[in-house]
């Protein structure tokens, strides 16, 4: 039996998830894949953040990805007239607007943390190392940015306010 190769992608071992998946080239067989966990998932499982902050991170990532949906097939977005109300162009523009409003609410320093750890699927430790910071400082900036993001979404009626969950 061959030993399983360990691939270090610059992540901590507890952040690498091994999973079996169907092999696209050979039917009825599986392959083993390794992937790095998303930073908000790791923080939620470690109980560093609550579900509200995790939902805010998912919402930001969703808007970030939706503003580019279908852009590989299109050369541009036409906004002077609406051929199909509610079409892909409208959805992309709405996502772009929501994303920009979130960026303004969080601020430049907060968006740097969210971009590195949430939007680009990086780790807090890697982001701290790139800035030559202590990882605790980077984690504090990320937590503050997630808190401001959640407050922004609560004010817009997207997330349930934290005070409603208190008994």
Image (cartoon, grey):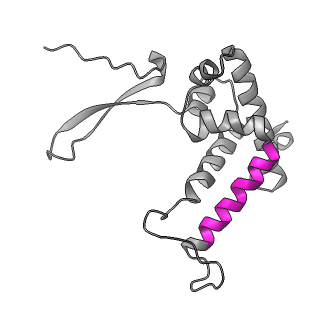
**Residue 120 location (% of width, % of height):** 55, 38
The residue at 70%/32% (across/down) is 50
Q: Dominant secondary structure of the magenta stretch? A: helix
Q: Which residues are magenta?
A: 90-106
Instruction: Locate residue 95 relative to residue 4 in the image: left or right.
Output: right
Decide which of 139, 22 is in the foreground and name it. 139
Relative to 148, is 76 above or below?
A: below
Does residue 105 show up magenta in the picture?
yes
The residue at 15%/47% (across/down) is 27
Q: Which of the 4 quarters of the picture holds residue 130?
A: top right
Relative to 61, is 39 above or below?
A: above
Instruction: Locate residue 89 relative to residue 152 in the image: left or right.
Output: left
Instruction: Locate residue 28 relative to residue 57 in the image: left or right.
Output: left
From where the camera sits, is residue 111 visible?
yes
Quadrant where the N terminus sits is: top left
From where the camera sits, is residue 159 visible?
no
Decide which of 116, 63 is in the foreground and name it. 116
Q: Which of the 4 quarters of the picture holds residue 36?
A: top left
Does residue 99 show up magenta in the picture?
yes
Number of numbered callouts drawn:
0
**Residue 104 location (% of width, % of height):** 80, 49
Quadrant where the C terminus sits is: top right
**Residue 5 location (% of width, % of height):** 26, 17
**Residue 113 location (% of width, % of height):** 68, 33
């Amino acid at each position: 039996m061959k030993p399983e190769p360990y691939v270090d992608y610059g992540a901590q071992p507890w952040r690498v998830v091994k999973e079996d998946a169907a092999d696209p080239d050979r039917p009825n067989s599986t392959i083993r894949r390794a992937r790095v966990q998303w930073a908000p998932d790791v923080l939620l499982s470690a109980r560093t953040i609550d579900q509200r902050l995790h939902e805010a991170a998912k919402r930001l990532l969703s808007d970030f990805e939706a503003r580019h949906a279908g852009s590989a097939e299109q050369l541009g977005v036409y906004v002077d007239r609406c051929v199909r109300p509610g079409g892909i162009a409208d959805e992309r523009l709405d996502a772009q607007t929501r994303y920009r409003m979130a960026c303004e609410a969080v601020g430049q320093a907060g968006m740097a943390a969210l971009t590195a750890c949430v939007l680009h699927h990086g780790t807090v430790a890697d982001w701290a190392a790139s800035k030559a910071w202590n990882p605790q400082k980077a984690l504090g900036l990320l937590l503050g940015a997630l808190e401001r993001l959640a407050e922004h979404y609560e004010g817009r009626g997207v997330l349930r306010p934290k005070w409603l969950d208190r008994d």
